[in-house]
Image (cartoon, rainbow, N blue to C red):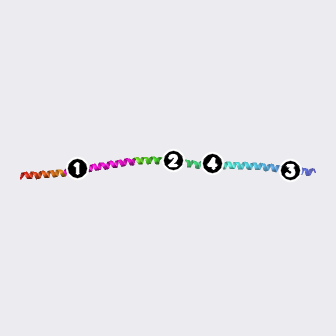
Amino acid sequence: MESGSSLELALLQLIHENQNRSIVIQNQAEKAKKNALRSAQNVSNLLVDSVNGGVEETFVNEKQIETEIRSLLSTIKQYKKQTDQWLATTHALNSVLKEIGDFENWMKIMDFDCKSINAVIRNIHQV
């Protein structure tokens, strides 16, 4: 029975070694799976950081552009107000110049009329 017993022991030993190898292989597979997941997570994080960095930079640039736009709009409003004031002043000056021109013309007409009246009076006195 020794040979049967030794055969049993050999089979048990083979089963035990097979189980141990299975456990080792399973542990190695689990470690490899964890490493692969960790690596995939790292790659994913790097990609997200890369994309987020670009998005963040774009967001900051957008905010700066919006600030500049508001500033420019304020400056444009000031220039528009100043231009409107200049136009009003120019219009008033043009009106005054027109009135001066009208007055000068009126003075010339009055001068001509006075000279005409003076000439008529002289003619009357000479006759």
Residue type marked 2:
Lys
Q: Nearer the viewer, residue 58 or 106?
A: 106
Name the magenta segment's main secondary structure: helix
Q: Earlier in the sequence, mark 1 or mark 4?
A: 4
Q: Earlier in the sequence, mark 2 or mark 3?
A: 3
Quickly name the residue at label 4.
Answer: 45
Q: Residues within 10 Å of mark 1 (few under 14, many from 20)?
A: few
Q: Position of residue 93 (x, y in %)?
A: 29, 48
Q: Residue at 16% x, 52% y: name it.
A: 113
Q: Earlier in the sequence, mark 2 or mark 1?
A: 2
- SS for callout 4: helix
Residue type marked 3:
Leu
Quickly name the residue at label 3.
Answer: 12
Q: CA distance from mark 2 to mark 4?
A: 26 Å
From which residue to which does the magenta span run?
79-108
- Give left or right: position of 70 versus 38: left
Q: Nearer the viewer, mark 2 or mark 3?
A: 2
Q: CA distance from mark 2 to mark 3?
A: 74 Å
Which of the numbered marks, if any, corresponds to residue 63? 2
